Image: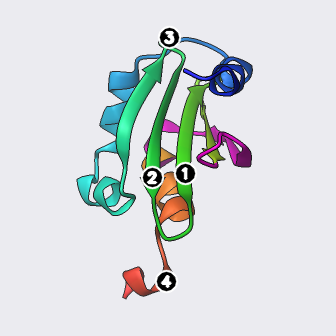
Amino acid sequence: MSQKKIAVLESAVQRNFDPKETMQWLTRNRLWVMTWGARNFTQFDGKALFFTVSGHHHKGIVLITLAWDDTYTVRLLSSQWNEKAVFENVYCDDLAELIDTKVERIKEYEQ
């Protein structure tokens, strides 16, 4: 793992969480995950989950961490691990929908 990747991960993490449980929230709608082009799901020391996406709005990395108040923080990163956007206070049942909206969803999908 590169030094930059480790530095980004270490600065983003707050507390441990179970990535398997987070994956259950993400994959409630498997179609969304497929449309994101999600791949390379990786957990970091039980404190972060990240994966690569190739969506309509975002191509790069999605980094998920858990805050002390039991809400998720979702970071959209470039493939070089530069931060593009941060979404805090995301509840578990809103996690997949937020990512879908920021990575892939376009108005035409609603028709």
Q: Please tell me which residue is depicted at 52% across the width and 63% down the height of the picture.
A: 101
Cα distance in 3D space between marks 1 and 3: 21 Å
Q: Earlier in the sequence, mark 4 or mark 2?
A: 2
Mark 3 secondary-structure assignment: loop
Is 59 within the magenta?
no
Is 92 within the magenta?
yes
Q: Relative to the observer, which residue lies in front, 55 or 96?
A: 55
Which residue is tagged 1? 60
Cβ–Cβ below 8 Å for labels 4 and 2?
A: no
Instruction: Check residue 111 in the rendering and tell me which mark sits there, or answer none.
Output: none
Callout 3 environment at 10 Å: few (<14), some (14 to 19), or many (20+)?
few
Where residue 21 appears, x then y in whole percent? 35, 25
Q: Relative to the observer, which residue lies in front, 58 or 25?
A: 58
Cβ–Cβ below 8 Å for labels 4 and 1?
A: no
Q: Please tell me which residue is depicted at 67% across the width and 20% down the height of the picture.
A: 3
Which residue is tagged 3? 45
Q: Of circles 4 and 1, which is in front?
A: 1
Residue type, label 3: Asp
Q: Which residues are magenta?
A: 78-94
Cα distance in 3D space between marks 2 and 3: 21 Å
Cα distance in 3D space between marks 4 and 1: 22 Å
Q: Earlier in the sequence, mark 4 or mark 1?
A: 1
Q: Earlier in the sequence, mark 1 or mark 2?
A: 2
